[in-house]
Image: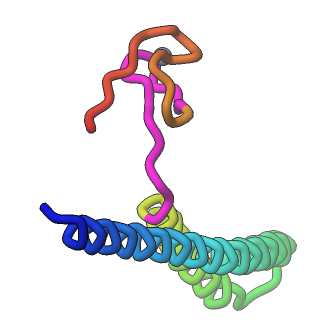
Amino acid sequence: MDFLQRISEKAKNLGGLAKEATRKSGDLIEVTKIKYELAKLEKEMEYNLTGLGLLYFQKHRGEEGLEGEIDRLIQSTGLLEEERVALEQEIEKLLPKGLTCSDCAVDLPAGGKYCSYCGSKIDKDD
Ligand SMILES: [Zn+2]
């Protein structure tokens, strides 16, 4: 490989690295967005559950005709819960996966050779 060729190889690699970095920061922005959605969703669930509590209380006191509203709230809270699980899975997918000790399943910081918790040797799969 001559000098010019080496230079152009190097430039290509750098370009790849830059692309990778952009992709990663894009993921982080995405995670922030999803977390924001998640917070809104949890707030909504809280409102629903508060509403449900109130409706049950009124029903318990003998108010009639609340079943429709109770059903509606239970259903919409169920949907919110499903959406919450989906968003959490989405975040999990986007965040870089850390190492886990194969013996004690503790999460480990990158770069270590031994588990800081149980001291067993870490097998890296890469
Ligand atoms: Zn361990």
Residue positioned 84% across, 70% down in the render: 57
Residue 18 falls left or right of residue 25:
left
Question: Can I make out residue 112 in this image?
Answer: yes
Judging depth in this view, the residue of 48 and 114 nearest the camera is 114
Residue 49 falls left or right of residue 77:
right
Q: In x, y percent, where is residue 46?
A: 76, 72
Residue at the farthest left position:
1
Residue at the farthest top position:
119
The reply to whether the magenta stretch includes residue 97 is: yes
Residue 124 falls left or right of residue 101:
left
Q: In x, y percent, where is residue 101?
A: 43, 24
| Scheme by which the image is coloured | rainbow
Magenta extent: 94-108
Residue positioned 51% across, 36% down in the render: 110
Q: In x, y percent, where is residue 31?
A: 58, 71
The reply to whether the magenta stretch includes residue 83 is: no
For the N terminus, the image quarter is bottom left
Residue positioned 70% across, 91% down in the render: 65
Residue 55 falls left or right of residue 72:
right
Judging depth in this view, the residue of 21 and 69 nearest the camera is 21
Residue positioned 49% across, 76% down in the render: 22
Q: In x, y percent, where is residue 16?
A: 34, 71
Image height of 95 relative to 21, above or below: above
For the C terminus, the image quarter is top left
